[in-house]
Image: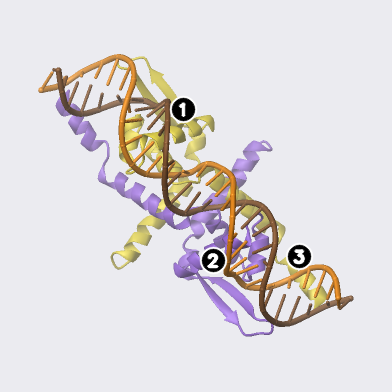
Chain colours: A yellow, B purple, C orange, D brown
DNA sequence: ATACCTGGTATACTCTGTTATACTGGTTAC
DNA sequence: GTAACCAGTATAACAGAGTATACCAGGTAT
């Protein structure tokens, strides 16, 4: 019983499983929270202006949007460009790095739609 | 200028974009937080026992695991079965519904691995 | 008898993500 | 002149996600 248990204990958690958990948690760390993915999605869909992005994400406050945009700029997910027009205009754009989240976002949108079908209509 | 602006305001946010944001936020609502996806991943990878799941997710406390498992059982993501062995044993298993998160988890693991390569080695 | 295993619960605390509300400073429209 | 738009900042407060630590009741191995 003892050796069996020890063997099981070691085998029950093979190396690549630990690696996968780590990778998963890294990703959650970067795009976690209520707003990051919606913001990425909005910008990738062509919204560039602060108020346009805000309007495209129901419920977000200027404070949260401002904070998240700053953090995402620091993390090189987006670029912020100020144009010296009159009045001054500001444009946010997604970087190539940001676009690597595409598959995740699509998978989540897909899940959300199916989930809704399941709940509301007959999926 | 005025009509143009109004038109832009309406057109800048087509129906399906709002739908996508909603779907995205629904998904985030269900699997959001630090631990749900790692737990789902662990159980889907064959871990059934409380302590095995806990060991497979570095850093999680018994309190958080207990809470999340309860919530996930309520939401029909997992089943909890008590076996009247001596001593009593408990097994958690993922439902088919839970397995629909597969594509999201895989996409996130994939992103996490590539992200690590980018940071550590030359990707 | 001592130490460790199982599957958790209890208590207390921190932290920060999130909300609410108001405000700034400049521009444009009516 | 007043109301609305832009791109935000300031301040305060809250709720709950997450942490830390200890503990319980049973069983098992030496």
Q: Quadrant of residue B13?
A: top left
Q: Residue at x 67, y 36 (%)?
A: B122
Query: Compared to C17, does B93 lie above or below?
Result: below
- Measured in 3D between alpha carbons, the distance from the residue under mark 1 to the one under mark 2, in whole angstroms, is 40 Å
Crowd rating for badge 2 (residues with CA inside 10 Å; few <14, some 14–19, many 20+): many
Query: Compared to B80, does A108 lie above or below?
Result: above
Closest to the observer: A19 or D20? D20
| Residue C13: percent from left, percent from top | 59, 49
Q: Which mark is residue A91?
A: none
- Measured in 3D between alpha carbons, the distance from the residue under mark 3 to the one under mark 2, in whole angstroms, is 24 Å
- Measured in 3D between alpha carbons, the distance from the residue under mark 3 to the one under mark 1, in whole angstroms, is 46 Å
Closest to the observer: C19 or B7? C19
Instruction: Check contact, mark 3 vs mark 2: CB within 8 A.
Output: no
Q: Which mark is residue A79?
A: 1
| Residue C3: percent from left, percent from top | 83, 68
- Dot 3 falls on a residue whose secondary structure is helix
User: If the image is split into quadrants, where does the N terminus of chain B sit?
Assistant: top left
Q: Residue at x 31, y 49 (%)?
A: B19
Q: Residue at x 60, y 41 (%)?
A: B115
| Residue for badge 2 | B69
Q: Closer to the camera: disc 1 or disc 2?
A: 2
Tags 3 and 1 both on a single chain: yes
Q: Chain of mark 3?
A: A
Q: Quadrant of residue C24?
A: top left
Q: Chain of mark 2?
A: B
Crowd rating for badge 3 (residues with CA inside 10 Å; few <14, some 14–19, many 20+): few
Q: Which mark is residue A10?
A: 3
| Residue B113: percent from left, percent from top | 61, 46
């Amino acid at each position: 019983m003892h050796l069996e248990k020890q063997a099981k204990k070691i085998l029950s958690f093979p190396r690549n499983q630990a690696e996968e958990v780590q990778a998963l948690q890294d990703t959650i760390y970067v795009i976690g929270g209520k707003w990051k993915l919606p913001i990425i999605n909005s910008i990738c869909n062509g919204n560039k202006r602060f108020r346009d992005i805000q309007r495209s994400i129901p419920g977000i406050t200027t404070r949260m949007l401002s904070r998240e945009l700053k953090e995402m700029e620091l993390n090189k997910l987006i670029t912020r460009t100020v144009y010296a027009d009159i009045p001054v205009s500001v444009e946010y754009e997604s970087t190539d790095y940001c676009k690597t989240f595409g598959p995740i976002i699509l998978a989540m949108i897909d899940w959300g739609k199916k989930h809704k079908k399941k709940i509301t209509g007959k999926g």
